Amino acid sequence: MRSSGIPQPKFFRLAIAAAGALLAVASAIAQDLSIREYKPKSTLVVPEHPTPRAKYPVIDIHNHLQNLTIESWKRVVQEMDELNLRVLVNLSGGTGEALAERIAFIKQSDTPDRMVFFATLDFNDLDSPGYGRRAAARLERDLDAGAKGLKIFKNLGLTVRRSNGERVTVDDPELSPVWELCAQRGVPVLIHTGEPAPFFDPVDPRNERWLELQIHPGRRRPPGQFPSFETLVAERNRLFARHAKTTFIAAHMGFHANDLGRLGRLLDERPNVYVETGAILAELGRQPRSARSFFVKYQDRILFGKDAYRAAEYPYFWRVFETADEYFDYYRDYHAFWKLYGLDLPDNVLRSVYFGNALKLVSALDRRAFPATDGDATAAGPGSVLAK
Ligand SMILES: [Zn+2]
């Protein structure tokens, strides 16, 4: 054995082989990394403005809170106070006795003015003649019992069928008495039609919601089982046209938040149509310039909505609407694998979207809890207890 400190060629070869093997293992790990595991940490350093509390009081027009107890309702109101959420419009009110009980529960609570309910339709007796008239009569009772509007779930158009298997279309004429009643009583219809368009498309590498559809295969809407996105949109738009005196709020910005030009054309054509922002924040936050122009132009037609009630998620909405922050995370990474940017909305637009438009559409909300909006001389003044 030599005593020299200089490594032998054989040692070199071994060392190189060992290093090579390590590199191969490392690169195998890198190649095995699934898209779910890849979470690159942004190195971008820019000003950040987390926004835990909305700048103005907010009416959430699209909410689903169920099985409230005295304790859980107290907790929710505490969270609402911290977020500056003033009123939740609960779309999971149901109909009949169940709805009346929910309304009574809130009315008898310490905070009766913090939640209102929309009624829903019961499709159980769809097959007996006269369904539409009966549904309208039930809705009339629900409105008399204190419901402030009607919620139509996505099952209408997607899954509601007559016993002969025939799909009930969104614009089924049978339902006309319901829409007419809403027009007569001056209550809005918040209608959810369809799903994001990619849910109807082949689940292939080009599908923008591929990851979500892998994780939640139940969200797929393959042709054969379901009508197409465009079929549903056409039915919905015919409904809007046919009932011009009924006020409709298209949920989730009508699933056109990724095509604001198209949504703008719909709003231009149909003055009875409004939209709300539930669950589409990631669409707005990836196009801050286009979305900002849209919000400025259609500021009288957009209502704030969140959908699922999770207190920790509201601040993402405030941050997107109120700040000019750049390249920040959304709360659901399979839903938006991209980053969000703030829209930096002007104050008058924020006021309209956060509460002004909802006060216009939903009667009997107490205006005094809200600041005055532009062109609204009576707000916050005496004798202005009831909107409309
Ligand atoms: Zn919803």
Image: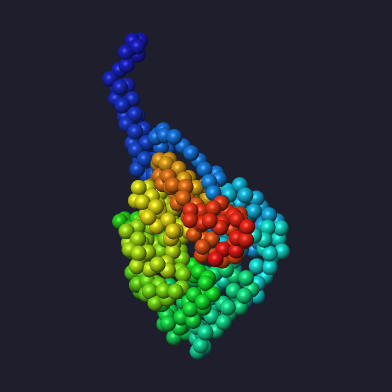
Residue 368 shows in this picture: yes
Q: Position of residue 347 (x, y in %)?
A: 47, 47
Q: Residue furthest top?
A: 3
Q: Residue furthest left?
A: 9
8 up-or-down from 226: above or below: above
Residue 190 lies, in percent from the top left, at 49, 67
Residue at image position (38%, 50%) is 292
Asked whether, in this view, residue 339 is left or right of residue 128, the answer is left
Colour scheme shown: rainbow
In the figure, is residue 374 to the left or right of 75?
A: left
Q: How many marks?
A: 0
Residue 266 placement (x, y as % from top left): 35, 65
Q: Nearer the viewer, residue 62 or 231?
A: 62
- Which x, y percent locates residue 136? 53, 80
Relative to the observer, which residue lies in front, 372 or 48?
372
Q: Left or right of 240: which side holds 129?
A: right
Compared across the picture, whether 184 is left or right of 39 comes to right
Q: Residue at x 43, y 60 (%)?
A: 301
Work out whether residue 247 or residue 286 is closer to the camera in this orientation and state it.
247
Residue 304 appears in view: no
Which residue does the image show at 46% across and 50% down from the upper left? 348
Quadrant that contains the N terminus: top left
Q: Quadrant of the C terminus?
A: bottom right
Residue at x-position 32% and y-position 13%: 6
